[in-house]
Image (spheres, rainbow, N blue to C red):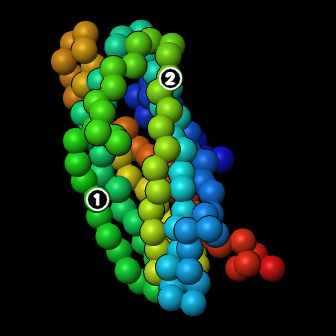
Amino acid sequence: MVQKVTEGVNIMVENFYQPAHSNPLNSEYLFAYRITIENLTAFPMKLLSRHWHIIDSNGTHREVEGEGVIGQQPVIAPGDSYQYSSASNLHSDIGKMYGSYLFENLFNKKIIKVAIPEFLLIAPAKLN
């Protein structure tokens, strides 16, 4: 697991290779990830949008942007956390992801950019 705190918002990432949904013979590798967002501030925070960088070891670089996460724009109360799972496909057995979220502090309406720490995506067979 990797984690990073930006302006009082803690982002924790765990990832998992999905062999049942991968096909290495066709260079298709699926990785699931679970994100936990913890609000360490004294104010409610609303997740507005996400921006991901997805990089394969073959040099492919994709960017994904959009509102919220998994169709939601959760409001996270002070001291609470929000967790969701998603997945990303790669065309190589090694890659990485990183990015950012935009949050709105619902007390003062300030918009903050929160870093999603870089995490590696590695098919287990590559580790042997």
Q: CA distance from mark 2 to mark 1?
A: 23 Å
Determine crowd level at label 1: few under 14, some 14-19, many 20+ residues with C-alpha closer than 10 A: few
The location of residue 82, given as percent across then percent down, is 47, 27
The location of residue 66, given as percent across then percent down, is 23, 48
Determine crowd level at label 2: few under 14, some 14-19, many 20+ residues with C-alpha closer than 10 A: some
Task: Give the vertical position of 14 relative to 108 (above or below).
Answer: below
Task: Give the vertical position of 112 relative to 64 (above or below).
Answer: above
Decide which of tag 2 and tag 1 comes sooner along the chain.
Answer: 1
Is residue 42 toward the left or the right of residue 110 in the image? Answer: right
Task: Give the vertical position of 31 relative to 33 (above or below).
Answer: below
Residue type, mark 1 in image: Val
Residue shown at 47% from the left, 38% from the top: 84
Q: Residue furthest right?
A: 128
Residue shown at 43% from the left, 34% from the top: 6
The foreground one among 17 and 55 is 17
Residue type, mark 2 in image: Ser
Q: Secondary structure at mark 2?
A: strand
Q: Which disc is residue 44 wearing?
A: none
Residue shown at 28% from the left, 30% from the top: 73
- Which residue position holds label 2? 81
- Which residue position holds label 1? 64
Q: In the figure, residue 64 lies in which quadrant? A: bottom left
Q: Is residue 57 visible?
A: no
Q: Quadrant of the C terminus?
A: bottom right
Q: Is residue 7 visible?
A: yes
The location of residue 37, given as percent across then percent down, is 48, 31
The location of residue 75, given as percent across then percent down, is 33, 20
